Image (tube, rainbow, N blue to C red):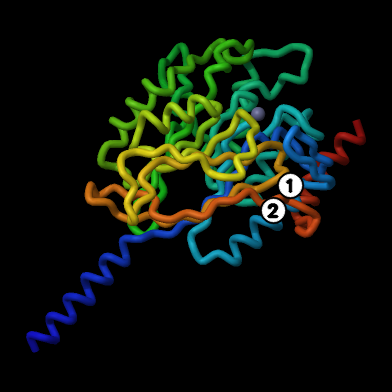
Amino acid sequence: MKRFLCVLSLVLVCACLYAQDVKLTILHTNDIHGQMTPLDYVNKNFSMTNVGGAARRATLINTIRKETKNRVFLFDAGDISNRGQLVNFFAEPEIKVMNYMKYDLMTVGNNDLKLDEHLPNKSPEAVNILKKRISEANFPVISANVYDKITNKRSFTPYVIFKEKGVRIAVVGFTSLKCRNYVQTVNLTFTDPFEEMDRVLSELKGKYDFLIVLSHLGDLSDYVLASKYSEIGLIIEGDFHTFLEEAKFIPHGTPSNKYIGGTLIVQDGEFGVKLGKIDFTLSKSPDKSYKISKYDYKLIPITDKYQADKNVETILKVYFDQQKAK
Ligand SMILES: [Zn+2]
């Protein structure tokens, strides 16, 4: 009997330890800027013909969701519109397509605050257009460092906490300080992201196990954030339109064979040419927070091997037809 109880408790201890690992997949985009259709893409590092397009992206995302056993999140790090084929609809088609793809979260990019940029008269009304778009979105649109000048309250939801197998994953949004100079944002205040991070950490104290920043601050600020705050496990960034083919790694303390011992930074370039995908395992650390113990990250080119999703084409056709009729 004694031996049986011993074996039983060993099994329970092992099961408990095993249960502490949580595997997740995050798919991510940034700086799509209203690029709805495939394009021939060229930058100083590579060129690709006939890549991207919202309809193919939807197919790739659905395929990954079907094939992946982990919970799959889909995030966008900002600048969904303000250029592109359907710019005259002020991000309405972008939000419709994102709803269809079941995005979980988006952060406010600097260009999302000036959806009227293509018009001759730009005005602070642009922020209300974004707020209308947010009301149409089936997912939260976050930023912690944007405040209303009159009420002194935050203009957007600052962060969201997801739960997966009992692990609380907090995602905080940040928006670039270059918005301070826009005609459209005269009624808003943009706070320093580092001061804001201190505030967010005190607000979230005891409420999360793993912290992600969905950032539209730009590369350098993200690097400083990652260096300064060991609490941040992952930064998914936008704004600089950089294709980070490998994750940047900012070390914190000594890595062990259990944890990578630092913060990862990932970014998916621009215009929906590729889709960011990070699969990772979270393991419980002695301080009871969760840290990344393993990861696999890549940017997947959205080529014509992914067939166009017919539902996305139908959503977009309405807008393309309206545009033609004008
Ligand atoms: Zn951008």
Asked which quadrant contains residue 18, the reply is: bottom left
User: Is 326 located above or below residue 126 in the figure?
Assistant: below
Q: Nearer the viewer, residue 246 or 97?
A: 246
| Image quadrant containing the C terminus | top right
Q: Position of residue 248 (x, y in %)?
A: 51, 40
Q: Residue at (46%, 40%) from the top-left corner? A: 249
Q: Position of residue 301 (x, y in %)?
A: 71, 50
Q: Residue furthest left?
A: 2
**Dot 1, how many residues are within 10 Å of its Cα: few (below 14), some (14-19), or many (20+)?**
many
Where residue 277 is drawn, which disc sits there?
none
Q: Left or right? Give the position of 293 relative to 45.
A: left
Q: Residue at (80%, 55%) from the top-left corner? A: 304
Q: Left or right? Give the position of 11 relative to 114.
A: left
Instruction: Name which residue type carries label 2.
Output: Ala
Q: Nearer the viewer, residue 99 or 190?
A: 190
> CB under 8 Å between callouts 2 and 1?
yes
| Image quadrant containing the N terminus | bottom left
| Secondary structure at numbered mark 2 | helix
**Dot 2, how many residues are within 10 Å of its Cα: few (below 14), some (14-19), or many (20+)?**
many
Tag 2 residue: 58
Q: Residue at (65%, 32%) from the top-left corner? A: 241
Asked which quadrant contains residue 250, the reply is: top left
Q: Residue at (62%, 29%) from the top-left corner? A: 240
User: Is 230 located above or below residue 154 in the figure?
Assistant: below
| Secondary structure at numbered mark 1 | helix
Q: Position of residue 102 (x, y in %)?
A: 60, 51
Q: From the Cβ of disc 2, is ligand 1 less than 8 Å away?
A: no
Inter-mark Cα distance, 2 to 1: 6 Å
Instruction: Name which residue type carries label 1.
Output: Ala
Tag 1 residue: 54
Q: Position of residue 152 (x, y in %)?
A: 41, 16
Q: Residue furthest bottom?
A: 1
